[in-house]
Amino acid sequence: MVERRTFLVTGGGSGLGRDTALALSATGARTMVMDFDIARAAQTVAAIREAGGRAEVAEVDPVSAFAHEQAVAQTVRVWGQLDGAFNAAEPGGPLYARSNADRPTQSEISLEPPAAPGIDLKIGGLWFAMRAQTGQMRKQLSGGCIVNAAPPGLSADGAAKPGAMAVKHTVLALTQSVAVEYSGSGIRVNAVYCDPQVSGAANKAKAREPRRAARTGPGLISWLLSDRATFMTGAALHLPG
């Protein structure tokens, strides 16, 4: 169960991040909603509060290690603990710079993210987010759980997008490596991804149901963050739809 627990949702101002923040709050969890767009994050928080839930807003600079540390500190300051996090990581989305001008040079990054041509700055936000989150969870000595959303590597017609595919698999690899590193600390780390399935009549029918993924995704993520999934870490699960 996730009630009476505290979760941090990065990219919670829209899309899967927003849907997951709402789903977690509906179970009774306390939710810190992060987004580089503070207005969108505030809208999510307003919707949660209107439904009787508890939520707060945290603004984050996507590629700032300090900003992620501050967001975690704010969560602990408000509610005393951090039990889990959902990182809605998509290129160009809340965890990443919004244009080349927003991205720091390599020399400006205090802690280098995993090196890979064309990926290092894109994956930096997720690296900084997990660094801050796992640091707090280790400090609490009570474990915790993290779920990362990897971006689709395929377009709607099934064509591969090389850049996005590279980011997707970097997210999955980083998820697995952190899961192994912190398995002894009781910290679970899993990933979800959603590539379109366009082969076969059944999959084409699913593709015509855009709301199916919205219904399935937040539920699966909430399950991964709950005690019902304590046996699972280092996994990458596909979101149907």
Image: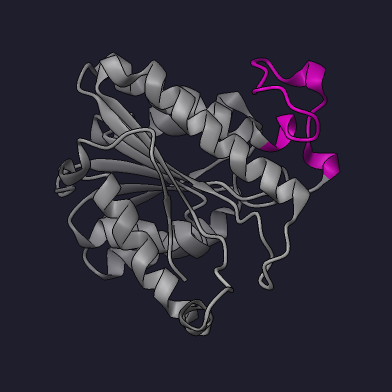
Q: Nearer the viewer, residue 43 or 2?
A: 2
- Residue 64 appears left or right of 120: left
Q: Nearer the viewer, residue 92 or 209?
A: 209
Residue 113: name its quadrant: top right
- Against 109, residue 54 (above or below) is below
Image point (61%, 56%), residue name: 152
Secondary structure mainly formed by the magenta segment: loop
Residue 83: name its quadrant: top left
- Residue 186 appears left or right of 33: left
Q: Position of residue 59 (x, y in %)?
A: 54, 44
What color scheme is it? one colour
Q: Position of residue 224 (x, y in %)?
A: 28, 46
Image point (31%, 42%), residue name: 7
- Residue 36 appears left or right of 25: right
Q: Nearer the viewer, residue 103 or 90?
A: 90
Q: Position of residue 100 (x, y in %)?
A: 84, 42
- Can residue 70 be seen from the camera position used here? no
Image point (35%, 61%), residue name: 218
Image point (49%, 76%), residue name: 203
Asked whether 174 falls inside the magenta stretch, the response is no
Asked whether 109 falls inside the magenta stretch, the response is yes
Q: Position of residue 235 (x, y in %)?
A: 38, 39
Q: Nearer the viewer, residue 38 or 68?
A: 68
Q: How many marks?
A: 0
- Against 113, residue 231 (above or below) is below
Residue range of the region highlighted in magenta in the rendering: 100-122
Residue 86: name its quadrant: top left
- Against 188, residue 196 (above or below) is below
- Against 137, residue 227 (above or below) is below
Furthest toward the right, the residue is 101
- Can residue 131 be seen from the camera position used here? yes
